[in-house]
Image (cartoon, coloured by chain):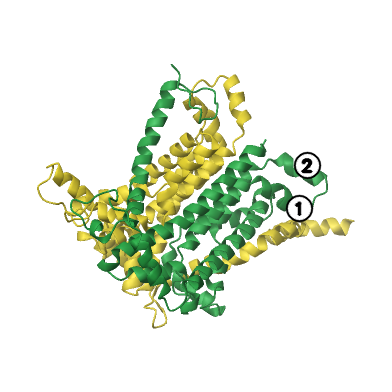
């Protein structure tokens, strides 16, 4: 008897035994990966008494929205309105992501498609830079930002994000694998300018690449608390504000659980929207031949 | 005519060859003006915010710098001190290698194999499965729930479970007992490791042309393993190298997970890593020169492992 998963793409060279094994491995994986997530969600709805129950319970028994209500009350009491923190976070996330995707893909395109003196050297510098600890570059970086006069401005967070090495290296790999030389040559024969080839031919066809980049950047910037660079209260970000609320100790455990859930929901929503776009492109384009 | 010959004959010293090389290079550069224009904005950002700080840090590694007084040149003293006097650094090196040797390859294969399995599903199911596996790394510091799970008192889930079933008589101090710290950190790190490379592998697998597999089936590819080895892996080579670099950089730099889970320092430095050592000197003791020297050594360790992995990956699909 052959397993027939209707949820799967048709593919040749697949055995029923292998399919079953894959299915079992995936189920086990999901159980291991999602367990702490279930716990986080469940904790956010637990009343304080249940959070400290013995023996501890995994799933909430008497779900309550009190944690979220408490969170709202605490947020309303904040000196700088919460909407301002949210706005700051959004500015940093959107500004940083858009700039990095644009500048890195521009550079990645040219490094991948053209050969010119210094290209390989530059690329290997980018790869090497991925292996240098950010902890020790933090001080020199602060010196640079201070020299530019950007301390306590959004630019201190946004502009350095544009030059992230990860984005360039990722993009270069995608352009290498997804864009065929013949496509570029055909465009050249048609007399398309370099920028046009990049913007109208290459970028639409590496959509999975920049969608993946957006997820990764969004996530890292969303967690950004402003660090040493933002010290004016009105410039600080949402993760910073929420982490301050949680600092209240045992009494704030319920609110802390709610905060963890709130901070997690946003990247997940972005991820879901983003992934559905990836799926769309690959369904319709059928490029890369 | 004859004078020209005489000129070229007299010229070809080392200088002449060099000048000619420079001239061809300059011509090449001028011909590729547009390329540099495309590269320029990113290059300026990269040099200002990455290359410059890295070079400054390398320079600092030869100094004594406490962040208050100007740096003092001490030559290779920091490096000598690391290897000859700092016993805890050597523990950190040993631990880092253990972590890297386990979490690096395991997370790398997990990322690829799961991405490969998930890729066979239809788009909607695939998106859900991707989310479920990717969720731990998307969700910030959700990994702190492991602290509750492995909590040393009877409220911890693991202790409560083992006590309830009578497997242990008194709660185990999972996050304090040196024998347990490292295995637990490894579990948590692996749990969070389906991150960047996992997503990149999934996107990469989607970019492989279906006709490649159809042609392969005609050419006599009979099962999924042959298909994986002869068709999928060679088509994924670029992404595989990317994933390897991600695995190296993340497995050699495990630190904040440990600090958050078991505190700093861990009992008897049982979980101490190179990056934790670096953070200790950089952010607690304010010995920035020493911390920079640690970063330089870690950098070379990672570069060497990357070279080794590159050699191995070049053999894929042969």
Pointers 2 and 1 within a single chain: yes
**Residue B120, placed above or below residue A60:** above
In terms of secondary structure, where does tag 1 sit?
helix
Q: Position of residue B191 (x, y in %)?
A: 36, 47
**Residue B24, placed above or below residue A85:** above
- Chain identifier for the green-coloured part of the image: A
Asked if residue B314 shows in the view, the reply is: no
* Image mark for residue A186: 2
> Please, which chain is the residue tagged with disc 2 on?
A
* Image mark for residue A196: 1
Image quadrant assignment for residue A124: bottom right
Quarter of the N terminus of chain A within the rendering? top left
Q: Are marks 2 and 1 in contact (CB under 8 Å)?
A: no
Task: Give whichever of discs 2 and 1 has the lower sequence position.
Answer: 2
**Residue B99, placed above or below residue A132:** above
> Please, which chain is the residue tagged with disc 1 on?
A
In terms of secondary structure, where does tag 2 sit?
helix
Q: Chain B appears in which tint?
A: yellow
Number of other residues with Cα within 10 Å of mark 1, as a class: few under 14, some 14 to 19, many 20 or more: few
Q: Position of residue B318 (x, y in %)?
A: 52, 30
Camera-near label (2 vs 1) is 1
Q: Residue at x 58, y 27 (%)?
A: B213
The residues bearing labels 2 and 1 have C-alpha atoms spaced at a distance of: 13 Å
Q: Residue at x 31, y 68 (%)?
A: B280
Quarter of the C terminus of chain A within the rendering? top right
Number of other residues with Cα within 10 Å of mark 2, as a class: few under 14, some 14 to 19, many 20 or more: few
Closest to the observer, A61 or A168 = A61
């Amino acid at each position: 008897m052959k397993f027939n998963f209707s949820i799967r793409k048709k593919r040749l060279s697949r055995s029923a035994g292998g399919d079953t094994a894959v299915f079992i491995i995936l189920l086990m994986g999901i159980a291991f990966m999602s367990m702490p997530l279930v716990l986080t969600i469940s904790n956010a709805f637990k009343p304080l008494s249940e959070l400290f129950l013995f023996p501890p319970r995994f799933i909430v028994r008497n779900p309550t929205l009190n944690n979220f209500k408490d969170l709202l009350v605490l947020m309303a009491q904040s000196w700088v309105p919460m909407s301002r923190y949210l706005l700051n976070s959004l500015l940093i996330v959107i500004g940083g992501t858009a700039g990095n995707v644009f500048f890195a893909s521009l550079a990645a395109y040219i490094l991948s498609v053209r050969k010119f003196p210094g290209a390989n050297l530059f690329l290997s510098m980018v790869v090497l830079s991925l292996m240098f600890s950010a902890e020790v570059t933090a001080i020199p970086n602060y010196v640079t930002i201070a020299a530019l006069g950007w301390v306590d401005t959004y630019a201190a967070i946004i502009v350095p994000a544009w030059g992230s090495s990860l984005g360039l290296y990722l993009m270069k790999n995608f352009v290498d694998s997804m864009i065929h030389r013949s496509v570029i040559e055909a465009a050249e024969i048609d007399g398309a300018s370099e920028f046009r080839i990049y913007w109208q031919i290459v970028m639409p066809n590496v959509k999975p690449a920049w969608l993946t980049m957006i997820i990764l950047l969004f996530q890292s910037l969303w967690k950004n608390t402003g660090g040493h660079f933002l010290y004016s209260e009105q410039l600080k970000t949402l993760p910073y504000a929420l982490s301050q609320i949680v600092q209240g100790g045992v009494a704030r455990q319920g609110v802390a659980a709610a905060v963890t859930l709130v901070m997690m929901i946003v990247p997940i929503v972005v991820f879901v929207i983003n992934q559905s776009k990836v799926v769309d492109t690959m369904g319709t384009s059928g490029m890369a031949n | 005519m004859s004078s020209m010959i005489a000129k070229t004959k007299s010229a070809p010293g080392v200088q002449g060859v060099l000048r000619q090389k420079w001239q061809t290079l300059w011509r090449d550069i001028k011909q590729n003006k547009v390329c540099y224009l495309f590269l320029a904005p990113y290059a300026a950002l990269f040099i200002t915010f990455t290359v410059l700080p890295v070079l400054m840090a390398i320079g600092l590694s030869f100094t004594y710098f406490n962040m208050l007084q100007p740096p003092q040149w001490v030559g290779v003293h920091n490096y000598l001190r690391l290897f000859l006097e700092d016993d805890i650094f050597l523990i950190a090196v040993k631990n880092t290698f253990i972590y890297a040797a386990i979490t690096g390859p395991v997370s790398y294969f997990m990322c690829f194999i799961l991405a490969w399995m998930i890729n066979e599903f239809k788009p909607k199911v695939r998106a859900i499965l991707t989310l479920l596996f990717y969720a731990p790394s998307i969700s910030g510091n959700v990994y702190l729930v492991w602290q509750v799970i492995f909590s040393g008192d009877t409220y911890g889930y693991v202790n409560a479970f083992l006590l309830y079933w009578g497997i242990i008589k008194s709660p185990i101090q999972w996050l304090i007992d040196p024998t347990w710290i490292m295995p637990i950190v490894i579990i948590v790190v692996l749990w969070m490791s389906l991150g960047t490379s996992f997503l990149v592998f999934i996107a990469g697998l989607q970019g492989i042309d279906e006709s490649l597999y159809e042609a392969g089936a005609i050419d006599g590819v009979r099962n999924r393993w042959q298909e994986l080895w002869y068709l999928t892996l060679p088509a994924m080579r670029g992404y595989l190298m990317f994933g390897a670099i991600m695995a190296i950089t993340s497995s050699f730099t495990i630190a904040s997970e440990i600090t958050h889970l078991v505190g700093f320092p861990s009992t008897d430095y049982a979980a101490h890593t190179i990056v934790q050592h670096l953070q200790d000197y950089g952010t607690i003791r304010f010995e920035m020169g020493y911390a920079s020297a640690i970063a330089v050594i870690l950098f070379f360790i990672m570069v060497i492992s990357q070279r080794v992995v590159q050699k191995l990956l070049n053999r894929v699909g042969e």
